[in-house]
Amino acid sequence: MSEPIRSLSGIQIAGCGSSLPERRLTNADLETMMDTSGEWIVKRTGIHERRMHERGVETTSRFAVEASGKALDEAGVAPEEVELVIVATMSADMPTPSVSCVVAAELGTGNAGAYDLNAACSGFVFALNTAHALMRDAGYRTVLVVGADLVTRFCDYSTFGRGAAILFGDAAASVVLRASDDTGTGLIAQAMHSDGGRARHLYIPRVGCDFFEGDEHDERKLGSIQMNGPAVFKFAVSTFPKLIASTLEKAGLSPDEVDHYVCHQSNQRILQAARDRFGLPEEKLHMNIDRYGNTVAASVPLLFDEILRNGEVHEGQRVMFLGFGAGLTWGSSLWQI
């Protein structure tokens, strides 16, 4: 007989952790690999370096496990207390088992539920919203939410693929959600959207029939990121501020009433445009894209872990998590910490 669903008063982010490959791939390194320049990359993206895993040796699961272990330690939570593991990723080690099942087993969570969620760069935000709903409505009390991607495995570092390859880096980061007696903690407002009609602007073809109608069917492109840079940039610049505005409207808040905007790190110019649009100071809309590039599902929790460890996030503050990317997808998650 199953246990009755337990009502919750609040949900808190109890711990956070991250994990990065040791190898740094700098713009100077890229200059030796393709026809590009560090100055050109910085001007258009704000990226100076990114992390890169060792192909064939390091796995998505490895970094997800390490980040999750750190998060559990910080939260003071034993692995066997975890009831559910959700891993946001688009670069699982293999079709099955899921990264989440490997994480659950390696950590020793027993028979905790585990599944992967793929919403690309929006993945962590979607997973965070999903975890909160399951805690509220299904009675889970301790949930591990992970964002992990080794997306450089899909990058073509020849001149042929330089438009996308300069952007991406590898990472994993994790948060522990716990039921709380504090009724003021938890999700305030959220949004999740997609537009598959524009999926062709950012995708990874595996076989010839994956190419969209009108795109060149070139076998050299199989297995690597295909990106229409101008279209993706236009999508992000137009969607990002609308997403912030609609989430604030749902919450009944003004931009200055949110303490931290933890945004997917896709392009420095996109983030700066949002700062300017809402009149936000640097200490509210954070960036670390210069050091890590676009780490896909890991991007948002990696940044959150950084500002948390820097002592910038405090109890009682409001934090808005924002993601947008392939699919195309975009979403928000506004929390009272």
Image (cartoon, rainbow, N blue to C red):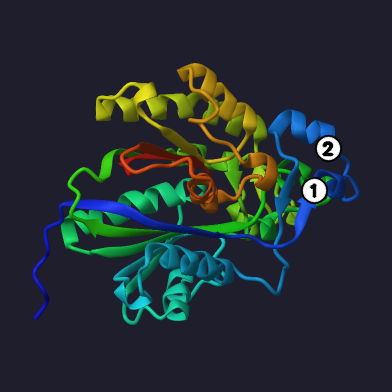
Residue at numbered disc 2? 38
Q: Is residue 309 left or right of residue 11?
A: right
Q: How many marks?
A: 2
In front here: 330 or 5?
Answer: 5
**Residue at 49% over, 17% down:** 277
Q: Is residue 333 left or right of residue 153?
A: left
**Residue at 34% over, 25% down:** 257
Mark 2: secondary structure:
helix
- Give the image quarter of residue 178: bottom left
Q: Is residue 223 visible?
A: no
Tell me the quadrant of the picture where the C terminus can be found: top left
Q: Are marks 2 and 1 in contact (CB under 8 Å)?
A: yes
Percent position (x, y) of residue 311? 49, 44
Q: Is residue 67 visible?
A: yes
Percent position (x, y) of residue 309? 51, 50
Percent position (x, y) of residue 236? 53, 31
Q: Residues within 10 Å of mark 1 (few under 14, many from 20)?
A: some
Mark 1: secondary structure:
strand
* Kind of residue at badge 1: Thr
Q: Earlier in the sequence, mark 2 or mark 1?
A: 1
**Residue at 75% over, 60% down:** 23
Q: Which disc, if any, is residue 26? A: 1
In front here: 181 or 91?
Answer: 181
Q: Is residue 291 left or right of residue 336?
A: right
* Kind of residue at badge 2: Gly
Percent position (x, y) of residue 313? 43, 42
Q: Is residue 120 left or right of residue 166?
A: left
Tell me the quadrant of the picture where the N terminus can be found: bottom left
In front here: 100 or 69?
Answer: 69
State the CA–CA distance, disc 2 to disc 1.
Answer: 8 Å
Q: Which disc, if any, is residue 160? A: none
